[in-house]
Image: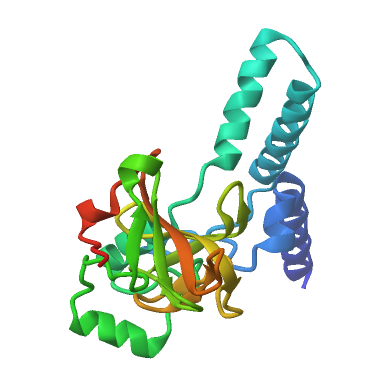
Amino acid sequence: MRNSADEIRRRYADKITREEQDPFRTSLYTGPSTPVQGKKKSPRFNGSFFLFQLMAAVCLFLGAGILFKNDSLQAVRGQEIIKKMYHSEFQFAAAQKWYEHQFGKPLALLPDKQAEPQKELSATKKTEDYAVPASGKVYQSFEANGKGIMVETGKSTRVDTVKEGYVTFIGKKDKLGKTVILQHSNGEESWYGHLDSIDADVKLYSYMERKKPLGKVSPSEDGKTGKFYFAIKKGNAFIDPGKVGIRFE
């Protein structure tokens, strides 16, 4: 009987010692006290590393705040780097294409595609061809504009997407009025400006299939025809839409 009491006291003392040496193991770790032969120890919460990450994040935040309060030359250079990082667009379409190529299913962080259009894309092997956004004739060429073209269409003509992609901008741009920008998986962007209206289904960061309506053209001065602006941008430069196979009448 005495031996049993001594054994209980010894086990209790060992338990207290383990708690003092490793409190996280006692409160958060529910696995066996000793690893089973041939099995790896279960992972446990590392409180020190979490606190280090938290403090590092706080220091970075405070450092950025101090940087923007400083007017020195070095501070201004640092401000420009941070601004550039925040203004750089994330390549949604390119990331989606890479992920599907590697893993064969949509990336959960990106907006889901609709089931039926996805089957249609599989059947057509996701053609790289651009569609014509709207029937019409070019009255201001790329050479004259340097960034895009102006197209004359019929009154209230619908403007469609030229290729599948993600909507990265909806709003007004200087000299372009109401504008929608799509980002495509090959890194290019298609711009649709001078729109009279934008469809309610067009949402920021939503996925758009090829030949889907974006909005309607704005009326011309005489009110008998319509017009809209169209451009293709690759990297930091605009390219002639004719070079990607888009032909107007």
Name which quarter of the figure residue 161 lies in. Answer: bottom left
| Quadrant hosting residue 96 | bottom left
Q: Position of residue 65 (x, y in %)?
A: 78, 29
> Eyeballing the image, is 244 above or below 222?
above
21 or 178: nearer the eye?
Answer: 178
Looking at the picture, tell me which residue is in the foreground, 208 or 9: 208
Q: Nearer the viewer, residue 17 or 139?
A: 139
x 58%, y 72%: residue = 198
- Measuring 68% from the left and 34% from the top, which residue is drawn there? 56
- x and y percent of residue 94 in the render? 35, 57
Q: What is the quadrant of the N terminus in the image? A: bottom right
Q: Residue at x 74, y 35 (%)?
A: 61
At horizontal 63% and vertical 21% (from top left) the residue drawn is: 78
- In which quadrant will I find the C terminus? bottom left
In this view, 224 is above or below 149: below
* Residue 64 seen in this snapshot: yes
